[in-house]
Amino acid sequence: MKVLILGGNFDNAGGTERVGSMLANGLSEAGYDITLASIWCGYKPFFPLNKEIEVCSLFDATGHNVSRTPSIIYKIRKLLKEKNIDTLIVVETMSVMFTLPATLGLPVKHICWEHFNFNTDLGKPRRRLARQLAARYCDSVVTLTERDKAYWLRGTRHKSQITAIANPCPFPVQYYDKPEHTKIVLAVGRLTYQKGFDLLLQSWLEVHKSMPDWKLKIVGEGEDRVTLARFIEENELKESVELVGNTNNISEYYKEAEIFCLSSRFEGFGMVLIEALAFGLPIVSFDCEVGPAEILQDTGSILVPQNDTSELTSSLIKMMSNDEQRKSISLKSKEKAEVYQPENIMSQWINLIEDIK
């Protein structure tokens, strides 16, 4: 079977591009003939791909001159015909605005893969229209969580099959000699409003007073760096908080940490949570929409009411103060991480693709 996975630009190093590449590799290893296509650029995908996977791009660059809607639709349709594609997986819901007209009359199974929270349009009202169209006219919509699936079922006039399939974890469950008492809390993500690192730093002000020998490391880069750095300096937290920036070796930070914290205002899933589980980290997380409640179920990790910084403070201090609790949660974290291993996730994708008539 020939499968086309279509995204915006697989040259990017984001989470969507990573799991899109993992899906391409998993399906390729399962015997599918895979083409990974970007709407623009995408000739040098950031994440490694199996050599059997064909990589292509509709346009060499971004810009209105090359990527007007009719041109994108034409190029997608041409690619579907040239490659004799059986199944199209659209990695970004907004792209359904292009793929629905492009697939008209073609014998192509059409799957929309949603990566964001149904209740969030990320400043693009057209995203809500795209979701309604996907639910009505795609053969299937894949959400990342059961909670988001429920939102789709309630919030759309769906005819398509709505299926929840979690993202695969990029790390196998880790077994290693952990350093004793590093006293490091780790947070990972883009330095942006969504990730709530401003809320985490407000909380850390109080945490630091009670637990002055613990340190907070925030790995990631983004537009809020200057604001966060100013807060750290003005509140004399430079000795206990480090803005690490981007890294090519995130596993080393997971290995040295004792606790993981997620302070997001909202999520589409929460990839960093399943990564932290794979390293056996106990987690303190806001119970934001969507992801944390499902991912952390039965692990013993702590869910904090959304945006409640005082509860985040007390939960972090509680976790820091209890070595035995952290050890117990670590074992449960690794057990839960098995659920998100690629072989389990790929079997769900294969079942979905094969079941669509």
Image: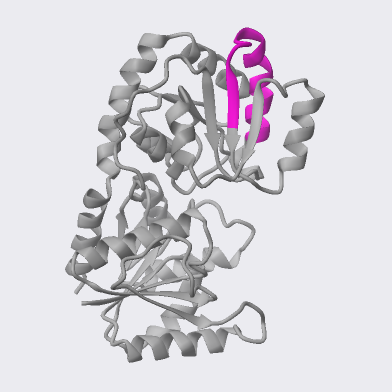
Q: Nearer the viewer, residue 286 or 33?
A: 33
What kind of secondary structure does the magenta stretch mostly adopt?
A: helix
Q: Is residue 206 magenta?
A: yes
**Residue 216 is inside the magenta segment:** yes
**Between 7 and 246, which is closer to the camera in this rendering?**
246
Q: Quadrant of residue 349?
A: bottom left
Give residue 336's position: percent from left, percent from top.
Answer: 28, 34
**From what the image shows, is residue 288 above or below residue 71?**
above
Q: Name the side, left or right, on which 68 lies relative to 42.
A: right
Against 357, residue 257 (above or below) is: above
- The residue at the point 27 percent across, 50 percent down is 342
Picture quarter with the N terminus: bottom left
In the image, residue 177 above or below residue 169: above
Say which quadrant the C terminus sits in.
bottom left
In the image, what residue occupies the spot 34% across and 16% down?
Answer: 327
Q: Nearer the viewer, residue 332 or 304?
A: 332
Q: Is residue 219 left or right of residue 293?
A: right
Region in magenta: 197-217
Which of these two is toward me, 81 or 56?
Answer: 56
Identify the residue shown where x is 31% and y is 66%.
Answer: 50
State the image coordinates of residue 225 (x, y, percent, origin top left): 72, 42
Instruction: Estimate the x, y position of residue 23 in percent, counting from the top left.
Output: 32, 61
x and y percentages locating residue 222 in the rendered image:
66, 48
Color style of the picture: one colour
**Which residue is rendered at x = 50% and y = 45% of the image?**
267
